[in-house]
Amino acid sequence: MRFKAILLSLLMATFSLAGCFGETEPEPESESEPMKSSRVFVTNGSGMSIEVTPLDMSFFFSDVAEDGPEPSIGITSSGCMFFIAMEKPMRSCDGGLTWENTADITQAPFTSDPYGWVDPVTDRVFNIHMMGLSHTWIGWSDNDGESWLGNPYDSGPTPLNDHIKLGSGPWTDSGYGGLGQLSPLYSEAVYFCYNKLAGIFCFTSYDGGITFPIGGQIFGLATSNGGLHGAITTAPDGTVYVTPRVATPTIIFSKDNGLSWDTREMGVDANTPNPRKNSEVATDTESNAYHVWTGGDQGIYMSRSTDSGDSWEQDSLRISPIEVISTTFPQIDAGDPGRIAITYLGSENSSLLATTDIDGNNWTGNGHYAPNGVHYHLYITYSLNALDENPVFHTHRVTDDPVQIGAMCLNSGDCRSDQGGSNRNLLDFNDLHIDRDGRVYVAFADGCTGTCATMESPTPADSRTKTGGVYYLEMGPSLYLDSGELSALV
């Protein structure tokens, strides 16, 4: 007590004398670097952090509020967004503030595995659905979904299996639109691909998707693995790409509107195991192509082609930061040369040890994996110089809470059901597209909503929803140079 009293007296004396020595000069504040968000990564082509200022951008979240596994997204020139998943084609024409279920006007006999596409040239909106194992409903609208027409498509005697996809692109002089082979009734070639047990089948429509009279099976690597494949992508020069799900990253491409097909392999330095789901290709305004996939170490990788798919880099670039150690569902789109955006689901806490498996093998809480289950988030990556020798990648973890806790089943026949329900809730893919201004839109399914999103330690059993959501670029750089910096829509 005596020591405390002496100390207090000394302090009081010091304070009382402070005025005798004049005003104390305030110490200058030291300049400090602005703190970088732990949710923002700036990396090189190896996934390593580099000292580059992050792009100034923000993202807007819109809750579609309906089930949305395997979503497709497209945006018309009027700004209407179409989010198509399950049996409810959703439309928003106010920047995602509200959504309308248009099922009552689409005239589609809804069954399963829908897919949506918006033709970026004509604004035709396509809404297609599997009708059992033998038919697909192909519907279309030319007035932002106010009215629809459609036809059933018969896939023939061998049952249609899965993975219905549709896309559109320019006619080519060497393809069906040239050499007097036919007179197209629609300004764009429309492609429809699906897999049967024998492989991938692709057909071409010259009347805007009303009929698909030309095409057939693609032979070669496309016949392996049951014909499973990713989305259809077309380039401004008319090259069309399909990505088969095979062990080595591969693209199948046609330069004659699907009359003939060729194959290229790439990325053997980051070999992709067979069941790693779909890869995807994007093309820019000069028909440079970018192929992304999840590699053997579960990072996102990319190979580039500057000659319309004829040759590809064999030394792939890593897009995802090294901190993101497990990924799936990569999607990509491009604007002007070198300006690309990629989205994927990823985790920064996938494992306590070196072994990871997104399918959940040995996911028993025995110490091999994070005890409360892996936390997967939605990531969006931009590059504005993706064709450079040393491109820079700007990655944002956009979700505040996880999209999934625990494993995601990537093989429909062996899903886990011993942790509170099947981990097949997110199904096979998400989607990313840009609008006419070069603004990026991402459609995804959220498996951790409601109480799962707010509880302190959610478990895999808490993460079994599949609610549709959209993130789009609120403010930041357009993927088209002429559009410059984009401002908020709402």
Image: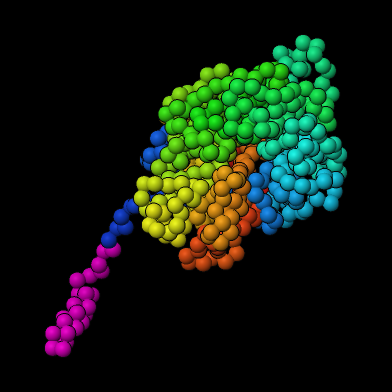
Q: Is residue 475 visible?
A: no
Q: Report the predominant secondary structure element of the magenta stretch.
A: helix
Q: Residue 2: where, in percent of width, then height?
A: 13, 88
- Determine whether, in the image, residue 432 is placed left or right of residue 172: left
What stretch of residues is rendered in magenta? 1-26
Question: In this view of the protein, which residue sits in the foreground, 433 or 126?
Answer: 126
Query: As drawn, which residue projects farthest toward the bottom?
Result: 1
**Which quarter of the figure has residue 244?**
top right
Residue 109 counted in the magenta span: no
Residue found at x 78% / y 22%: 214
Residue found at x 39% / y 53%: 368
Question: In this view of the protein, which residue sits in the foreground, 220 or 370?
Answer: 220
**Which quarter of the figure has residue 430?**
top right
Task: In the rendered view, tell whether residue 402 sits above or below residue 219.
Answer: below
- Determine whether, in the image, residue 311 is placed left or right of residue 353: right
Q: Residue 342: where, in percent of width, then height?
A: 55, 39
Q: Quadrant of the N terminus?
A: bottom left
